[in-house]
Image: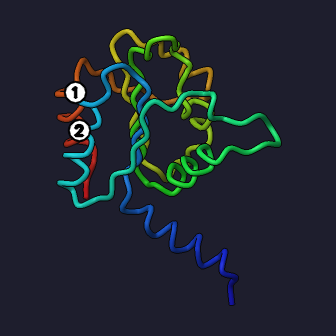
Amino acid sequence: MGSKDDEYFVRRYEAGKKEVFFAINSREDSPWIEAFLRVVRERGLRPIFYSGVGRKVVPPTGQSNTLDDEIRNDFYPAKTKVLYFGDPKNGSDDEDHWVLSNLAHVGTEDALLVYVSKDYPVEVLRRYGFKGTPIVIADPAEFEKSLREQIVG
């Protein structure tokens, strides 16, 4: 007999199988989000996305942040994670993306699709523990085409 917490985590794990998480912190993000939503909904999956969330949301060690907690509660259970790194928003830089501090903790059982613009410095991803090969794309149309090939229902 499990606790209510155990039941919650089992339900959350099961729901995550049908969820696709997307994080973007780049200029002109609306066309990217629209492409993501179209593909995920066509596949009968549940889209979850966060836009414009930078590193300031990540709390110092030993502290918490409600938004960071909310994002983590969506990020980790989702079995498919789609991340985009491109031109930073004004007043930002290539490392101002909430997800960077979480890259090294993505499980191997999850599908991790990391997209970058042609000029994004991939060494930033390496510094944060990403060992894969990012998918280089030029625009939202290429992004949508790739998502259609990568995400299955």
Toward which corner of the image does residue 128 lie, by quadrant?
A: top right
Crowdedness near tag 2: few (<14), some (14–19) or many (≥20) residues, C-alpha within 10 Å: few
Mark 2 or mark 1, whichever is nearer to me: 2
Residue 114 found in image quarter: top left
Which mark identifies residue 74? Answer: none
Query: Badge 1 is on which residue?
Result: 140
Q: Is 96 drawn above or below residue 105 in the view shown?
A: above
Label annotation for residue 34: 2
Residue most toward the bottom? Answer: 1
Q: Are marks 2 and 1 in contact (CB under 8 Å)?
A: yes
Which quarter of the figure is the N terminus placed in?
Answer: bottom right
Residue 95: image x %, image y %?
A: 56, 19
- Residue 98 location, x and y as percent? 56, 32
Residue drawn at the location 39% of the way across and 41% of the way down: 22
**Front-most of 85 and 27?**
27
- The residue shown at (19%, 46%) is 38
